[in-house]
Structure formats: C-alpha cells, structure tokens
Image (tube, coloured by chain):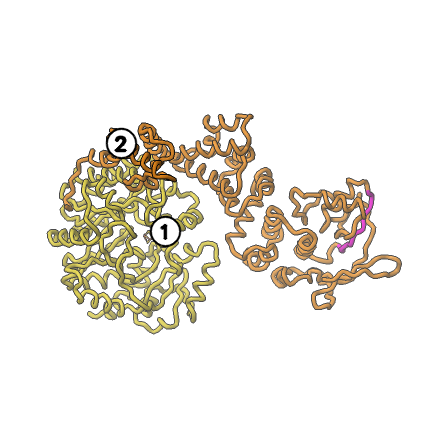
Amino acid sequence: MDLKGRFARYSEFGFYLNCMLPFRIEKIYLDEKAEKDWVTQSLLRSLPGVPVERVEDKRNLIKQSLHIADPIGMGKRNLLVTHFYGRRLKPCPGTSRHICCGYHVINAVTNCTMDCSYCVLQGYLNNPFLTFYSNWDDLLREIEDFLSMKRNPLSRLGTGELSDSLALESIFPVSQFLIPFFAGRENGLLELKTKSAMVDPILHLDHRGKTIVSWSLNPPGVIREEERNTASLEERIGAAEQCQRKGYPLGFHFDPMFDYPGWEEGYREVVQSIFERIDPKGVIWISLGGFRYPPKLRAIAKDRFPDTRIFSGELFPGRDGKFRYLKEIRTEMYRKMVEWLREVDSGLFIYLCMESREVWEDAFGWAPENSSHLNYLFEERVKRFL
Amino acid sequence: MKYEQLEGGGSLCLRIETKNGEETKPQVGEKSFASSLPPQTSNVTTGMADMKMIQEIPLHQIDLLDETFSVNFMPDLRSLRSSIREIGLIQPVLLRKRKGAFQIICGFRRISILRELGNDKLPAMVFEERERDDLHLFIVCLHENMMARGFHAVEKAIALEKLIDYFDVDRSVIIQSYLPLFSLEPNEKILSTYLSLARMEEDTRRYVLREEVSRSNIRILSALAPDDRIALIPFLSSLKLGENRLREVLTILDEICRRDRVGLKEMIHRTEIQAILSREELTPVQKTERLKRVLMDLRYPKMKTLEEGFEKMRKALHLPAGVSLNHSPYFEGRELEIDFQFQSMEEYRSFVSSLSSLADKKEFEEMIQGSRIRSTKFEIRNNLK
Ligand code: SF4
C-alpha cells in the first residue's frame, strides 16, 4: 500500500484517536501553501472537531505568538501545518570541543506535546508552535538520497531531537511510515527516542531490526517534577518490554541525568527496574549525559517552571559555553552508572553524550580518539548486534 | 486637553476640551468606557469636557476614608507641601457628590496637605453622583496624575490591580491599552509582574520602592511564599544590595532551598548567616560581602572543597612572590597555568630557576596528577574499546 493509502486507512480512526489523545490540540493553523497536500488533508481528518484557521503568512502568526505570556506553552497545544523549505536531514549539531557520536537528525516535526522543564527546544526554536511539515514526500526523498550516497557504511538517523519521536504518533503516523522505510535500507538505522509509552501503533510493523526504539529515563521523582505530560518510568519500561517482545533493538538514554540529594539511590533503582523486565542482550546501547544547558535556557525555564529544581546543582559554564555540572560530579555519576550497568551485563555498550576526552578518561579509564572514532565504534557495535 | 480659566458670574470655570478641540457631551451611565476609548486617546476622558465650576468645598464634607480612586503608595509630599504652603493650591481637586459626603476622585495628596496645614475648605470641581461611571472617573484620575507627577512602580501596580479587580476591565484591554499608558510594554508577563507586586505585603512593596527593585527581581520575590517574603525583607534591608547583587542573593537562596528542600525562613536563620547579620560593627557593604561568601559556599560545596584543596597544595609549593598558579576554569580541564611578569633578565632568570625547582617537589607532582589519580582509582573497563 502506498503512503496515501496507508494514511487514509489510518485516519478513518481519527475520531477515536482524537478522543484518546494524551494531550489536547486546541487549534490547527493551516498554512495556505500546505492546504492541498494529501498529508494535510489526512491530518485534518484525524483531528475532527479541532478548529482550523487558515494562515496566509506564518511569519506573522509566529511573530504575534511571541508577545503572549507563555508562547512555548501555547505552542504545545496549537498545531501549525506548513511546508519546510530547506534540508530536513542534518548532522546532529553536537557541541564544540566535545566528542560526539555522528548521529543524523530527521526534522519531521518540531516541538513536542510533552513539557520538560529542561527541554532545550524552549530556547532553541524560534517558532513556538507544534509544527508538522506536510511536504512529507520531500522528506522521504531526502532520506533516500542521503542513504543512497552511502557516505557511511551505516548511518544512524533519528527523529527524537526536535521533538519526541512518538509524541504525535496518534495524530500522524510518522514512525509508522519511517519504520518500514528503514526496514528496506541496508545502510541506515532509525532511532526513535521517546518519553512516551505509545508503542501500540508500531508493534505490528515489520522493522527487520533496523529501528531502535529508545527511552530517555530518569528516576520517578524527576519524571514527576520535571517531565510534564510524559509517561511514568513504569509505563516507559512496560512499553520497552512490549517492543523487545516484538524484536525491536532497544536503547536507553540516561540523559539528562540530574545531581540532587539522593541521586545515587534514584538512578540505581532505575537501572534495577529496567533489567527486572528487559533482557540486556537486546539493548543495543545506553547513553549517559549529565544535565547541560545553554545560558539562555535558564531564564526561560525558570519563568515557565518556577518550582523547577534543575538549576540547583553545581553547574558552571564549559568550553562550549553550555553549563554543566562540575566535572567531579559528572564523572562520579558516570562511573557509578557504568558500575551498576556492568553489574547487570558487562557487555552493555555505554557511551557518553557530548563529553570531553578528559571526562571519558575519568569515567571509563580511556577515551575515543575523536568523534569519528566513536562513530566507528558505533558501526562495529551495530554489526555485532544485528 | 486644554484647561482654560474663564471669568463668569464671579466664579472661576474650567473648560476641558478634547484633543481636536471639540467638547464632548457627558454620557451619563456610559458603561464600557475603557473598551471603547483606550486611555491613550482619552484626553478625552475628559469626555466630561463640559465646563466645570470650581467650587469651594468644606474639608469636613469630604470622605477621607474612601480610597476607591486612590493609587497612592508612600507618597513623597515634601515638594507639594512646600509649594502649597508658598503659593496655595494651583490645581483644584476632583470630587464626586455622594449622599452624605464628597468622594475624592483626584487630589488625595493635596487634600491631605491642606488638612495638615489647617485649611478648612478647598477649591474643587465636582461631578454629580451619576454623571460618570466609576471607571471613567478612575481614568480621569490616572490621566491627571500621569500629567502632574507620573507613577512609581507600586502605584502602577495598584492602578492595574484596581482596573482588573475593582473596575472589572478585561486583561487583554489592560495589556493593549493601559500598559502603554504607564509606559510599559504591552504583554501578559509585565501585567502579571505588576499584579503580583500589588498583591505583596506592605513591607515588601516598601522595599521594592525604596530600593527601586527591578521587574526581574520583583518576579523572583513574587515566586516566594508570603511568609518567606516577610522573613526575607528585614534580612535584605540590612544589606547593601544593588540590582545584580540582589538577584544573585535571591537566586542563590532560592536554589539552596530547593536543593535541600528547606524553607527560606529556616535558611535565613542559619547560624552562619545570623552571625554575620548580628555583627553591629560591620557596615552593610561588609555584611553583604561576607554573606555572599557564606552563601556561595553553601550553594557550591563541592567547588568549595576543590578550591580549598587546590589552595592548600598551592601554599605548600611556596611559590615566589609574583608567580601565580591557576587551575583551569571551574576545574573543567586538567591543565594548570603558571603566570609571572618580569622586567629584567635578572628577574626572569630568578623566576625560571625557582619554577624549575618545582619539578622536584612532591606536592607539585601530586597537583599535576590530581585528577588522573582520582580517575584511575576506579578500574572500570569499557567494552567500547
Ligand atoms: S520530550 Fe523531549 S522534545 Fe519533548 S519537551 Fe521533553 S525534552 Fe523536549
């Protein structure tokens, strides 16, 4: 079945889906240029009853929205359907003077219905709306072209950088398109990163091991206080268990990790909870990353989440200008995590996200030479794993 | 708006004209004045615009307790008092006729001074009881005050709160029309900041006014529980805090309290803090400096330990005067930096020779190895390798 056919079948259930959404879309702003796209039409069918306003000039809409008290909060409840002009597949920006893993980011949707106090998108996106780009066929073409160039023996791509990979699955089946698409590609691997538990729509898909479903995890207290509208730890692990049963390789990201009184107990319990239900042999990788933030996030997040505790740690500006925990604290967290994870399975592939050589060395006793070396290690890991 | 004194029938009259010079008729019972006439265009307010006779009203007939139209807060009456004492009242006050007594629309300060000076009557323009609705009169009062003296932050806050809570004006109208009247940017955040200020305790508002606390600091104060603010104000008042210092102190206190899950009151009453505050021989500036150090240590305990450890090792090296030894910023890197300045070859040689002897010192080697020693303590192998 072609894409349109697949979606038409899907959107018949729109009404039911809309009633079941774990979030609320208050209004759809429809860019005139996107109006005729089949994706737009199908999307509108899947959100019946939601008022639609046609927009001639989205820049104006965005500009006006920036004057209200909480544009970011508003943006999470209002969907803008528009075109994206330009490249939608980009290397993960990483961070300067740190070792990065060579990931590629797919921009299918920007923004997210969840609301984490630490989310960098709050200060990063200049368009606060939950935005769906309806020139979907262009995106698939771009991914196809990228993979056919075979720049790397194996490219890792993900949709979870500018949004949550599964957050909007109930209104548009982004992952349900991408999973079969990647199943047929030799040199591409898709990673869906999420904090949701909405895996039902992807369980039946033929993924051929080419999609990794991964969860960002934190202790329950942190989830409750800092990750609004996300699934609980139990639900995330439950969803991971379901995916593992369906043969999906799993990933876990302890990123961002927070330093707070009692963090050791908190994170240790998370590790235990995971592996009570998950077979470590089916986990392709685990990343660790201490909380870090660009300076301008602080004011935005404190304004939006006056009760947040994320800035209470010993955070200082690093070489890339981002604030991070004192190196001593980060390395201590990483060492402990590595120790607990190794106790579960010494073969787990653990890496650090956006850290310096020194920190790698302090945490592991060695460090990749550089970002390409880390990328190579990933390729080797995938070869052995799949 | 044009004020014009006319001679007529032996009494003084005041004509209030609209911008374009046309007089407007009073519209009795006019309801939604604010929504139809945004305040910027309402010199007009004056929509009353007919001629008002100036009357002499006995002071005892004025209801001094009715503060419906007052936005005063800690008024500074000194210059107004000396002006009235010297040349009398130039501008008549605005009153509204009410059963039993006159209600003050505009002129609370003038009336209070005239009373204080022992006057028993004063010149006033008087509105009839139902001539204008309350909101209209409040806008007249705002305009008159705006032109005569302007408003400080707390008065703006009181005015905005009255517009919402008492005069029932819609928030969006306030943002679009009234914030610019007070020279404020028209957005929700600014309105919320001022409303929170209006609702703060008297002492906090006094502090805000006295110290000219900025909007961002008002927002920080507004996030605190009233009890915490009540405890905090005497503490802040005993220090010498500029804008940035105040923000720093408030932020550090807040972050420690959040991290340790303790109340602000409890935090302020810690012995090390009270010990500084109780030292009468210290000036507010000295207290502020010492307090900042204590707060920083409480806020960044691990950094403090690292700094102290580094300092101890540095001292043990007995570096020659003029040589400084520094760690990387925030101990992020492992590098150390030695810095010295010299003016002559002799001086240079002397520095170099004392520095080269550092290599033989055990303490120096330990310092260099410091972070490596810590990292190799944990023998964790990683299968990535
Ligand atoms: S789930 Fe991810 S994208 Fe969504 S708000 Fe949280 S951090 Fe941001």
Shown in orange, the chain is B
Task: Work out whether B210 lies above or below A179.
Answer: above
Q: Which residue is mark 2?
A: B357
Q: Is residue A157 above or below residue B319?
A: below
Residue B120 sits inside the magenta stretch: yes
Can you see residue A228? no
- Amino acid on which disc 1 is placed: Asp
> Which residue is identified by label 1?
A115
Q: Where in the figure is residue B116, as x and y percent of width and height?
A: 77, 40
Residue under mark 2: which chain is it in? B
Distance of label 1 from label 2 (alpha carbons)? 58 Å
Q: Which quarter of the figure is the N terminus of chain A placed in?
A: bottom left
Q: Which residue range is magenta in the image?
A: B119-128
Q: Amino acid at mark 2?
A: Ser
Q: Nearer the viewer, residue A337 or B132?
A: A337
The quarter of the displayed image where residue A328 is located: top left
- Look at 15% across and 61% down and name the residue there: A187
**Residue shown at the point (74%, 62%) measured from the top left:** B2
Mark seen at residue B187? none
Give the residue displayed 19% in from the left and 45% down from the top: A367
Q: Is mark 1 within 8 Å of ligand 1?
A: yes
Query: Residue B53 location in percent, x, y?
Result: 81, 57
- Front residue of B306/A301: it is B306
Give the chain coloured yellow. Answer: A
Is B131 inside the magenta-drawn segment? Answer: no
- As helix, strand or loop, the secondary structure at mark 2 comes to helix
- Dot 1 surroundings within 10 Å: few (below 14), some, or many (20 or more)? some
Give x and y (percent) for residue A200. 23, 55
Q: Label 1 is found on which chain of the structure?
A: A
Q: Nearer the viewer, residue A56 or A171?
A: A56
Q: Quadrant of the C terminus of chain A?
A: bottom left
- Magenta portion: prevailing SS class: strand
